[in-house]
Amino acid sequence: MLMGVGIMFLTFIGMEAIAWAMHKYVLHGFLWFLHKSHHTRHQHTFEWNDLFFAWYGSLAMLFFIFGSEPLDYRFWIGAGITLYGVAYFLIHDVFIHRRIKMFGRTSNVYLKALNMAHRVHHKVKGKHGSESFGMLWVAPRYFKAASEVVNKQEQDKSGAVHH
Ligand SMILES: [Zn+2]
Ligand SMILES: [Zn+2]
């Protein structure tokens, strides 16, 4: 069990590395025709880019199927992929892109840094020239910028009380 949780955790970390490489070299590479839908403003509920959820979902499902009865390491890899998918969806689709209105403004420096980094990624509308391809891993410079914004927010808040 403990071993299983360890495998799940490592898979989760590994998925961030895989997602980063996929995004940088594949989505902004030969699968750009699908990912493009995510870099274009539109009014649709779904994007072609959402197919990637189906892809990772099917992958996790296969791990679950082959890794149960008896339960082995593959089950935990499936669990790690699923966990990453959920985290990715909550942060990228709900929190950053607000596809479901659930979260308000945050004063959490990490979440703010994530948001800033990903908005920089979206500044470039084309296939080339983007940066910040990761999701949960954020370059240190964004932490600095984010903590400045959060400090300012806090100051504004305490300022409002005195008026
Ligand atoms: Zn992209
Ligand atoms: Zn995005």
Image (tube, grey):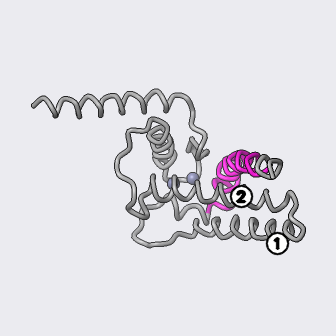
Which residue lies at the image location 73% right of the left edge and 47% below the top edge? 9
**Magenta region, residue range:** 7-32
Q: Residues within 10 Å of mark 2 (few under 14, many from 20)?
A: many
Residue 65 numbered mark, or none? 1
Estimate the spatial distance between the alpha carbons at disc 1 and disc 2, rounded to whole Å: 14 Å
Expressed as whole percent of the image width and height from the top left, the position of residue 16 reads 68, 47
Q: Quadrant of residue 58?
A: bottom right
Q: Which residue is mark 2?
A: 81
In the rendered image, the quadrant that contains the C terminus is top left
Q: Quadrant of residue 80?
A: bottom right
Residue at the left extreme of this rendering: 163
Q: Is mark 2 within 8 Å of ligand 2?
A: no
Expressed as whole percent of the image width and height from the top left, the position of residue 67 reads 85, 66
Expressed as whole percent of the image width and height from the top left, the position of residue 6 reads 78, 46
Observer-nearest of 43 and 10: 10
Count how many numbered circles sit on residues in the image.
Answer: 2
Residue at the front extreme of this rendering: 1
Which residue lies at the image location 83% right of the left edge and 48% below the top edge? 3
Observer-nearest of 109 and 128: 109
Observer-nearest of 69 and 98: 69
Observer-nearest of 139 and 76: 76
Q: Is residue 61 above or below residue 3?
A: below
Q: Is residue 89 left or right of residue 109?
A: right
Does the magenta stretch mainly form a helix, a strand or a loop? helix
Say what amino acid the circle numbered 1 marks.
Ile
Q: Dot 2 lies on which element? A: helix
